[in-house]
Amino acid sequence: MEFSELIKTATVESVLLAGTGLPPVRGTLCITSHHLLLSSCPGGDGQPGTVELWLLIRNVDAVEKRLAGSSGTITLRCKDLKVLQLEIPGMEECLNIASSIEALSSVDSVMMMYPFFYRPQDLRLEEGWHLFPLEQYFQKIAAETSQWRLSDLNRDFTTCPTYPAGVIVPAAVSDDTLRRAARFRQGGRFPVLSYYHPRNGTVMLRSSQPLMGPNRKRCPEDEVLLGTVLDEGERGFIIDTRSAQAAKQARMTGGGTEPKSSYPQWKRLHRPLERGRPLQESFIKLVEACNDASLSMDRWLSRLESCRWLSHVKVALSTACLAAQCLDREEASVLVHGAEGTDTTLLVTALAQVILDPGCRTMVGFQGLLEREWIEAGHPFHLRCARSAYSHARLKQEAPLFLLFLDCVWQLSRQFPFSLEFGESLLLALFDNAYASDYGTFLCNNEKERCLCKVKENTHSLWAWLNQPEEKKKYLNPLYSHNPLVIWPSVEPQSIQLWQGLFFRWIRPSQYLEEARAEMQRLVEANEAPAKESAGSRLSRSLSDPAARTENER
Amino acid sequence: MEHIRMPKVENVRLLDRVSSRKAALGTLYLTATHVIFVENASDTRKETWVLHSQISSIEKQATTATGCPLLIRCKNFQVIQLIIPQERDCHDVYISLIRLARPVKYEELYCFSFNPKLDKEEREQGWKLVDLNEEYNRMGIPNDYWQISDVNRDYGVCDSYPTEVYVPKSATAHIIVGSSKFRSRRRFPALSYYCKDNNASICRSSQPLSGFSARCLEDEQMLQAIRKANPGSDFLYVVDTRPKLNAMANRAAGKGYENEDNYSNIKFQFIGIENIHVMRNSLQKMLEVCELKSPSMSDFLWGLENSGWLKHIKAIMDAGIFIAKAVAEEGVSVLVHCSDGWDRTAQVCSVASLLLDPYYRTMKGFMVLIEKDWISFGHKFNHRYGNLDGDPKEISPVIDQFIECVWQLMEQFPCAFEFNERFLIHIQHHIYSCQFGNFLCNSQKERRELKIQERTYSLWAHLWKNRADYLNPLYRSNHSQTQRTLYPQMAPCNFLYKFWSGMYNRFEKGLHPRQSVTDYLMAVKEETQQLEEELEVLGERLANLQKMQLNGNKIQSKQQDRSKQLGLSASTNSLANTPQEYGSDLKSFPSRSPSQGDEDSALILTQDNLKSSDPDLSANSDQESGVEDLSCRSPSGGGCLPSEDSGKDSDEAVCLAV
């Protein structure tokens, strides 16, 4: 396929662009394989044009056209929730442009996507792809206990096509046993270590559902695997992210959940979390409600309620807290799974780690967490983030689980404003990049696909870009100070708020809030300036330095 | 004292509202002014103090096996649940409190016994802090168009107005008196705010007694005088803040609203703000939602919407925005009224002033604003906030709504206000506490008769003395947000109006952000200042002395300071250290100690408060200066590092009931 075949009209003069939050501007519209450009010539024809719009076509979620006389208006609804309007002279041009954007934005082949063509000058291709090797994560665990080992039984992705090559498993369980256990789990996702809680040595595992089926099949290897995790007399908890009813029903289709009789040391807790289509619909409804200018104050809250989004946030946070509570307070290990173990499971395990582990609350630690618990763990980003809230296309497998996770992290950052090293802007950037990106980080559904497409060889990593000093500064939380404790959020409805920074990003003018943020930054920097000059600065700095402080406490 | 049947009850349990499993055992004391609960736990002896005047209702519930429950709801939104072992004791406490919470004479109120140990001169100085004449001078008045009138000098024209009233120069005593006879309770149009940049003004009054056809020449002349006092504009807005239906109904009773045909060049406008009864019920409904035990998101959102509270807040804001725009953008003067002109009118005029004039967004200016639009113009504090026993139908959260409007604006314009949320919360608290004389009675006349200024203290002086606690660190007098008129978003802006849990759930500390940005930034700001000063000192020393040693000593003390501050901010972190109830079916999953850390840190702080010699602090106890209030500034609280949370649970081994 050639992109040029999809582009019916490449340029149109005198197009009016509106909806950017700035006054409408007229210029030349240009369609390339991956971008929509609009450049204006404020100084007349002789002047070089100013680029007013540089939109990744992959970011377009819906194209709506309206023809009136000899011209037409195209409304572009983007995956990042921005809405743009293009007024195009000439009916034919308008139709051509619309269909070109539609065709280009629905190219589904991974290898055709922009990250494979994007070659920024100041980054090297291999940069950022190996920042968070699992070996390194494992070494930290190995320093504390010898009960876990790093297995490469999945190096060719045959045992589990959605797991990465390396997984952390109980040292006492052989690869052979694991292979058999994998056959008893949907998609081969046998229980693996997700998080080791250094304070008391408990662990959080994740997997998919056991394939019990209607005949209540058992699998001795799976039972051994889970049995090994707990010492004699110890209890563990299985957090099933489906209702007890749904888990039971899953047996009819070959799935199920761990029965007490086969796993006597494990107690099951059911916490139904929404996923799939209902979650996507919740997202769509919320965005609709946020854009509804006709809504009056007396109906806003019930409309918000009917979207259910905040309920999903509340349940996700509570479930993650429950998992964290099991580990930290009950000192019991936890296994988390739903059905496939690639959606709500990851939401819970990742979120619980942000709550428990101060390391995950740093800029680098959070990236490592995303890499480990979302990307390598096989959350199907390509399927889930194919479409955002505006798309008219028939829903396939889209579901905003990753957005829900980011929202929950935002709630944490609001309740603990000093405890996260990064700010809202990072969460927004992650949302944008998960749905449409210049970088390869969120491409494909799992490591196996990424290997096949040679993503790591042929695209740039988002982390490489984010971690450039100038770029990184934009995402830091100026108020951050290392908090070694577990952060237990409130999950009462009074404490859960709509994430305005995301859902109203393009709707409300945020100038005053931006000013407040700048003022905060200014205050903190003013504090650092004299501190730097001060002779006592080194001492006081060492106090605020995370590493030095944990040393002190020990 | 004669009303106290039972000064002390032992073995009373104080229940925690969030977690019903937690209860503190202690002793309940009734004093002439307070209900005090002292916990038994010997290491902590945490105290909870509640002023009688804060009590809004007392409910004695059916006796159970464990004792007799008593529910005390407070006007500052604290809810106290006690269980008293003996039914008889409970009854005595109940009967005593019923009487104590409803004083019949002003002299019974706390401000007449409250003594902050200030001498007479200091007290007088305190009352002089806010001076309305000075305020009208600041606005540029008197001038060519406006003057002070002594027509009401002995309250002869209107007994709920102040003695000094500002009116257009062309309005003669004859016109004023004539107009007053045509207005409910003789509340004639008077100046509330004057914009010296364009001569536009906000005036206020009560409704005209127009009925279906009545006219009054003097009233028409009065409005014309107001319009002419703004030579740049050829008409005057008359804003009736009531819903049109209510205003029409008033016509049948011989009251009503201005007929545009009878007044020259007015534009008449209804802005539907509901009456005090609707607002009282709305608050009641919202508080019921706040009291729900572990509500779902849906319960909460539905309940909040059904209460209508935020809709009412938005209506008041919209009215204020309309007036501010008329004055600032159109340069047109506005006359505002409702029925009597002392509730909705006060709300709307003060919101508009706040939007228009940056001065009212400073701490001092905000005190002046309340003094001007609420206290001096006869807002009926005694009736609305039930200070003395009276008609429950007169009670309504009118000023609470105004205070919330300010908070909503602070959320939208974080750099525009010199003061912080705590300032608003403390003002709300003291409107009900009756600890200071400012808000007593229903009018200036009553206050003068009671000699309030000679017998009580002023809240403004008290707040001003502690102003460091109330500063907004993001405020800078040269910041662009502090300069101009504020223009809040109009539509779509539903989402901008948020539930204020910092006020209505202020005693449920667990619901709030566990770290206070305000306090942190204030500490940072102060530290910066200190560091800069020290840097200067160091620089001088280096220049003067050759000895390096001296310098070293200085460094050490510096470092200790810093560690103290960090220690404190970390101790607020320890609040982070308490899981809440994350699932109701965890009964089979007994949590070891859900809130250990929380209590510990709270206790250290309250004790600091209580041991303080400042009588005011002890009077308000920890409800007022909660954990957040103890900012990083106080050096006394330093050095308490976060305790290792692991140690706490170990002695309470609880088996998992699986």
Image (spheres, coloured by chain):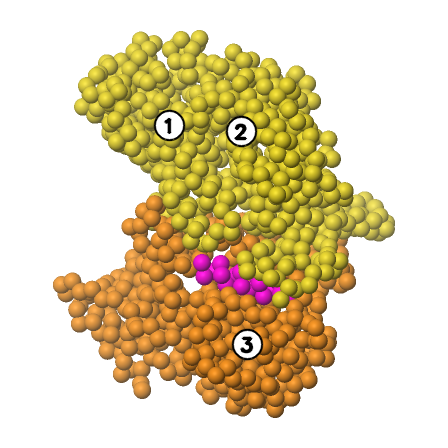
Direction from residue A382 to residue A530 in the image, left or right: right
Q: Position of residue B478 (x, y in %)?
A: 51, 40
User: Is circle 2 on the same chain as circle 3?
Assistant: no
Q: Name which residue lies at 62% across and 79% down.
A: A226
Q: Nearer the viewer, mark 1 or mark 3?
A: 3
Q: Residue furthest front?
A: B65
Is residue A277 a member of the stretch shown in magenta?
Answer: no
Residue B18 vertical position relative to residue B384 in the rendered view, above or below:
below
Q: Name which residue lies at 37% across and 48% down.
A: B494
Q: Main secondary structure of the magenta part?
A: helix
Figure quadrant of the C terminus of chain A: bottom right
Q: Nearer the viewer, mark 1 or mark 2?
A: 2
Residue underneath mark 1: B345
Residue underneath mark 2: B432
Residue underneath mark 3: A258
- Gap in Å between the C-alphas at discs 1 and 3? 66 Å
Does residue B548 appear in this view? yes
For the residue marked with disc 1, what is the amino acid?
Thr
Q: Secondary structure at mark 3?
A: loop
As drawn, the chain in orange is A
Q: Secondary structure at mark 1?
A: helix
Q: Name which residue lies at 53% across and 34% down.
A: B59
The foreground one among B91 and B550 is: B91
User: Is circle 1 on the same chain as circle 2?
Assistant: yes
Is residue A317 a member of the stretch shown in magenta?
Answer: yes
Do callouts 1 and 2 mark residues in contact (Cβ within 8 Å)? Answer: no
Which color is chain B depicted in?
Answer: yellow
Q: Position of residue A182 (x, y in %)?
A: 54, 85
The residue range painted magenta reads A311-327
